[in-house]
């Protein structure tokens, strides 16, 4: 791997793991999937391609945050606002 | 108008996504080994305070929580979201069970005076006991105006213009600062406490206090008789013919 991108990849992995703790299907399920997704691309060497993959990871981070926010909002709305 | 100091109350409650189980002896609900997090309505209050700071309306955001040692996690979350510092009033597990909004209101009003807060912000209610009293009581104790169920806050001359969610519509009121505000669900969309921010929050100051430091005595004003599960819905039945349905309805006394 292009050595200088390694910290970024690890950071992304850690961020996603942290987000996985709240995953509706459970942390273990999420961690398995996450690890598989990273392992799938472990042989990627091209910097441009890694950049692209990092971008996709960031997109997933945003999506997860939005998912949790909406899930919480909808649960509360259902519980406290009957209409 | 600038440099308001905001005091935000945040309660540690059982996470909204957890299935609540009642203790076999009906004395309460099972809390051991259950995931806890910040009360979602308090999260909204914290978010609003931070947004005020980002808009340069507020100068400092102080998070407050009263509860067992674990409540500090909740305060760390508040600081990871953006609160500057926090105050933890620690009580032991037995006391934590008898805490009522009146105790929190007394603590909040004392701290608000001590910290010279201009705005006390809390969630409208906690998702565990659903009391919806803390903001109102705090306002009464401080003799400050209150704006409960806020769904929009705007700065106004000498105070705030608040849109409130009331039955069947919205009400817009103007309050002078200092004031007490309680947040409703639609006030904002709270941000997620990111990992780097949680790390940074560990360095933010957290003051540990006791209820006695504020001259508040935690004693039970009421006794919990029993806690029960909500009734479960009875299973339905599939019927083959219209006649059967009519008979069933007649038996049930519906027609």
Image (cartoon, coloured by chain):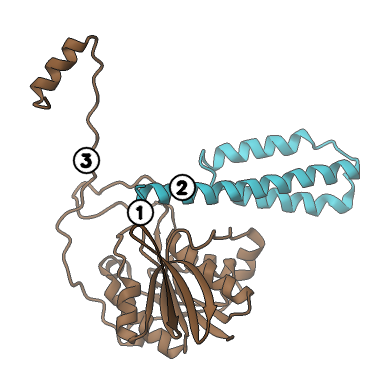
Chain colours: A cyan, B brown
Compared with residue A16, is residue B92 higher up or lower down, i.e. above or below?
below
x 22%, y 30%: residue: B234
In the rendered image, the quadrant that contains the C terminus of chain B is: top left
Q: Does label 3 or label 1 sit earlier along the sequence?
A: 1
Drawn side of residue A2 relative to residue B238, left or right: right
Residue B65 drawn at (x, y percent): 42, 72
Secondary structure beneath disc 2? helix
Residue drawn 20% across and 55% down? B27
Q: Nearer the viewer, residue B183 or A28?
A: B183
Q: Identify the residue position indicated by label 2 in the image.
A: A74
**Residue B254 higher or lower than B183, as above or below:** above
Instruction: Identify which residue is drawn at 54% across, 58% down.
Output: B189
Q: Nearer the viewer, mark 1 or mark 2?
A: 2
**Image disc number at residue B32:** 1
Q: Is residue B209 left or right of residue B61?
A: left
Q: Chain of mark 1?
A: B
Query: How far apart are labels 3 and 1 at the CA level?
Result: 24 Å
Q: Which residue is mark 3?
A: B231
The chain letter for the residue carrying disc 3 is B
Q: Quadrant of the N terminus of chain B?
A: bottom right
Q: Are marks 1 and 2 on the same chain?
A: no
Of B229 and A4, the residue lying toward us: B229
Q: CA distance from mark 1 to mark 2?
A: 26 Å
**Do circles 3 and 1 both sit on a common chain?**
yes
Judge by depth and name the residue closer to the eye, A28 or B48.
B48
Task: Kindly indicate whether the residues beneath marks 3 and 2 are on one polypeptide chain.
Answer: no
Report how far apart the C-alphas of labels 3 and 2 lie in the structure.
23 Å
Q: Are marks 1 and 2 in contact (CB under 8 Å)?
A: no
User: Measured from the top left, where is residue B21 in percent x and y?
Assistant: 30, 46
């Amino acid at each position: 791997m292009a050595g200088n991108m390694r910290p970024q990849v690890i950071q992304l992995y850690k961020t996603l793991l942290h987000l996985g703790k709240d995953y509706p299907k459970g942390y273990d399920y999420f961690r398995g999937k996450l690890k598989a997704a990273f392992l799938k691309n472990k042989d990627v060497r091209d910097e441009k391609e890694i950049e692209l993959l990092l971008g996709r990871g960031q997109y997933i981070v945003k999506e997860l945050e939005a998912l949790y926010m909406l899930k919480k909002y909808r649960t509360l709305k259902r519980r406290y606002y009957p209409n | 108008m600038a440099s308001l100091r905001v005091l935000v109350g945040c309660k540690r409650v059982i996470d909204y996504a957890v299935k609540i189980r009642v203790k076999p002896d009906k004395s309460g609900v099972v809390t051991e080994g259950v995931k806890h997090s910040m009360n979602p309505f308090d999260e909204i209050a914290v978010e609003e305070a931070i947004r005020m700071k980002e808009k340069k309306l507020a100068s400092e955001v102080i998070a407050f929580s009263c509860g067992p040692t674990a409540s500090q996690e909740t305060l760390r979350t508040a600081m990871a979201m953006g609160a500057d510092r926090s105050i933890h009033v620690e009580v032991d597990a037995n006391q934590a069970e008898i805490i009522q909004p009146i105790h929190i209101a007394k603590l909040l009003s004392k701290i608000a005076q001590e910290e010279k807060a201009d705005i006390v912000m809390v969630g409208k209610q906690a998702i565990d006991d659903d009391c919806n009293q803390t903001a109102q009581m705090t306002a009464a104790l401080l003799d400050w105006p209150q704006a409960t169920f806020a769904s929009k806050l705007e700065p106004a001359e000498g105070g705030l213009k608040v849109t409130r969610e009331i039955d069947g519509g919205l009400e817009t009121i103007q309050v002078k600062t200092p004031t007490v505000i309680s947040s409703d669900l639609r006030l904002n969309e709270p941000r997620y406490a990111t990992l780097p921010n949680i790390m940074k929050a560990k360095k933010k100051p957290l003051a540990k206090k006791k209820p006695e430091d504020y001259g508040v005595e935690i004693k039970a004003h009421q006794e919990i008789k029993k806690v029960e599960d909500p009734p479960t819905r009875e299973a339905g039945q599939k019927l083959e013919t219209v006649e059967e349905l009519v008979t069933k309805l007649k038996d049930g006394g519906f027609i």
